[in-house]
Image (cartoon, rainbow, N blue to C red):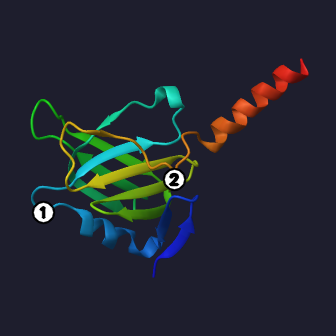
Amino acid sequence: MLGTIVVGVEATVKQLPAARWTEYLVSLAPNHEGPMASVFVAGMRPGDQRPVRARRLRAISFDPHEDELKLSVGGRDWSAPELRYVIAAPRRIGVQQSSGSRALVVDDASGVRTIIMLASKMQSGATSAPPAHTSQRSRAGNRARYRRRRAACVS
């Protein structure tokens, strides 16, 4: 059974139990032409976040022995080289589904959130933005900014 997490007014993310991660990700793995995938790291500072070009999903899996989620996109020709992502020590995987697309929201042990957008009808040159409900800053980054601002006010 999927648990539900409400993350703001706009979206609901259904959390997958850890025991189902491998099975669920295998169901997403493409057998011929996979969906288009865009990957966002929400822990990055807003200035570091670049528009992401959607690329074909080639492979996605979770290895419980290595405690890693692995993702491979692109790789068909020179214009879209293969990119591989490894998310070490995922602690939560949630799914947000809408018409024609879904978002996997992965929180790792260090508190970084990675959003994997999957869309079946997206053009290969398209760019997309992360879901509106996700934060663009990590907790650690927010704490550091707060401390700097507080120190500046005290001085």
Quadrant hosting residue 33: bottom left
In the image, taking residue 122 as reference, residue 13 lies left or right, namely right
Q: What whole-number distance in Å separates the C-alpha atoms at marks 1 and 2? A: 28 Å
Query: In the rendered structure, which disc, 1 or 2, sits on the residue that comes first in sequence?
Result: 1
Residue closest to the eye, 55 or 20:
55
Q: Residue at x 56, y 45 (%)?
A: 135
Q: Looking at the picture, which amino acid does disc 1 mark?
A: Asn
Using the image, determine if residue 84 lies above or below residue 66.
above
Q: Is residue 89 left or right of residue 69?
A: right
Tell which tag, 1 or 2, sits nearer the viewer: 1
- Report the residue at 37% width, 64% height from top: 97
Residue under the point 30% across and 51% down: 71
Point out which mark residue 51 bears. none
Tag 2's secondary structure? strand
Q: Position of residue 154 (x, y in %)?
A: 90, 22
Q: Position of residue 100 (x, y in %)?
A: 27, 60
- Return the residue at label 1: 31
Asked if the residue at tag 2 contacts the one at tag 1, i.e. Cβ–Cβ closer than 8 Å, the answer is: no
Residue pointed to by mark 2:
108
Quadrant of res 104: bottom left
Q: Quadrant of the N terminus?
A: bottom left
Image position of 7 with respect to 22: above or below = above
Q: From the top left corner, tell me how far across and down residue 3 is, in percent.
A: 52, 75
Which is more toward the observer, 125 or 113?
Answer: 125
**Which amino acid type is shown beneath numbered disc 2?**
Asp
- Residue lying farthest to the right in this orientation: 154
Q: Nearer the viewer, residue 84 or 3?
A: 3
Q: Can you say which quadrant of the picture contains the C terminus?
A: top right
Q: Quadrant of residue 74?
A: top left
